[in-house]
Image: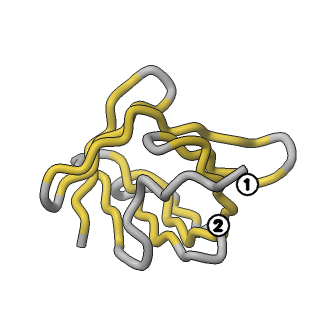
């Protein structure tokens, strides 16, 4: 069985387009992603996550055995990445 090609840009920074939420990710080829998560003018954390490529347009981010977030329908258009997560579409700039 072959591993699907990653639907996310490796080694580039993804930054959520939002005025209230902070989400940045930098995916590494070894299956880890450095993240910054929080709210504008509020608390922020910087976990190191693992990720798995599920298909050509979906990934799963894993913080622990009990915490996993799945991005589906990932699309890249130039320097913009869109993904569905928890029932909503998120838009990220690719830097």
Nearer the observer, 86 or 3: 3
The crowding category of the residue bearing disc 1, from other C-alpha atoms within 10 Å (few below 14, some 14 to 19, many at least 20), is some
Discs 2, 1 touching: Cβ within 8 Å = yes
Quarter the C terminus occupies: bottom left
**Between 17 and 31, which is closer to the camera in this rendering?**
31
- On the image, numbered disc 2 is attached to which residue? 47
**Furthest residue in direction left, as rendered:** 78
Q: Earlier in the sequence, mark 2 or mark 1?
A: 2
Residue carrying label 1? 63
Label 2 to label 1: alpha-carbon separation: 8 Å
Quick one: which residue is furthest to the front in this view? 1
**Residue at the top extreme, as displayed:** 87
Is label 2 or label 1 in front? 1
The disc placed on residue 10 is: none
Q: Residue drawn 73% across and 50% down?
A: 1
Residue at the limit of the structure toward the right, as seen here: 65
> Residue, x 58% and y 37% (percent of image)?
70
Which of 41/10 is in front?
Answer: 10
Q: Is residue 12 left or right of residue 65?
A: left
Compared to residue 88, the image places residue 59 above or below, namely below
Classify mark 1: helix, strand or loop: strand
Res. 49 image quadrant: bottom right
Image coordinates of residue 63 in percent, x first then y, are: 73, 54
Q: Nearer the viewer, residue 77 or 39?
A: 77
Q: Residue at x 53, y 66 (%)?
A: 35
Residue 67 spot, x, y in % from top left:
75, 42
Query: Helix or strand or loop: what does disc 2 sit on?
Result: loop
Q: Residue 24, image x and y in percent?
A: 41, 63
């Amino acid at each position: 069985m072959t591993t699907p090609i990653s639907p996310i840009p490796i080694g580039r920074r993804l930054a959520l387009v939002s005025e209230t939420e902070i989400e940045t990710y930098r995916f590494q080829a070894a299956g880890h992603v450095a993240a910054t998560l929080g709210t504008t003018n509020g608390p922020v954390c910087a976990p190191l996550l693992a990720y798995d490529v599920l298909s050509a347009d979906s990934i799963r981010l894993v913080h622990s055995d009990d915490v996993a977030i799945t991005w589906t329908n990932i699309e890249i258009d130039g320097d913009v990445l869109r993904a569905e997560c928890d029932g909503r579409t998120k838009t990220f700039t690719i830097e």
